[in-house]
Amino acid sequence: MAGLQQTNSEKILLSWVRQSTRNYPQVNVINFTSSWSDGLAFNALLHSHRPELLDWNTVVSQQSPVQRLDHAFNIARQHLGIEKLLDPEDVATACPDKKSILMYVTSLFQVLPQQVTMEAIREVEMLPRHSRVTREEHIQVHHQHHFSQEVSCFAFLLSSCSSKVVVSLAYALSLM
């Protein structure tokens, strides 16, 4: 039940973001990872609700992703009271941390107008599901593969070495 609730919360949040940034052709938010890495989505979200806080054309044309992210986080801190929870360098990557982005966007959602239309929610439901592996899934698979290799190595040594060597190796592996 909690997983389903989280999915619905993410849909609503993504719907709100897409609805808020619809008039910004440079912004197409389809997830809570790579869609945020260039800093445009954060700035567009702020500008759509509080246009007096920033000059959109300056943000788009003159700043690097790290500068745009820093700009958005500073605007949110100074004018909306949202602490700078993210480091621009951590977000300006190919796959920023989804939970961190969700946390920050939720903070924005709590202080900015929250109207979400059913049309926006239906639009999110129609977005293509990516078959790409998330960073968390990649790390999990990597760790499982690494552990599997260690077990295979240990089993091989167990079958071919004396018990004294096996006990020493088992102790060494337990310290890793």
Image: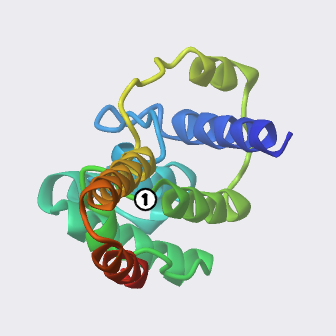
Q: Is residue 70 above or below residue 52?
A: below
Give residue 86's position: percent from left, percent from top.
43, 74
Q: Which residue is mark 1?
A: 97
Give residue 50's position: percent from left, percent from top.
54, 59
Give residue 38's position: percent from left, percent from top.
26, 53
Q: Farthest residue toward the front?
A: 162
Residue at (72% x, 62% y) in the render: 110
Left or right: residue 2 versus residue 26 is: right
Crowding around mark 1 (Cα neighbors within 10 Å: few <14, some 14 to 19, many 20+) is some
Front residue of 132/163: it is: 163
Left or right: residue 157 versus residue 87 is: left
Give residue 168's position: percent from left, percent from top.
33, 82
Task: Name the colour scheme.
Answer: rainbow
Front residue of 96/114: it is: 96
Amino acid at dot 1: Asp
The C terminus lies in which quarter of the figure?
A: bottom left
* Quarter location, residue 147: bottom left
Give the total number of marks visible in the rendering: 1
The N terminus lies in which quarter of the figure?
A: top right
Residue at (57% x, 53% y) in the render: 49
Residue at (32% x, 59% y) in the render: 150
Q: Is residue 64 above or below residue 48?
A: below
Front residue of 123/148: it is: 148
Residue at (34% x, 48% y) in the render: 145
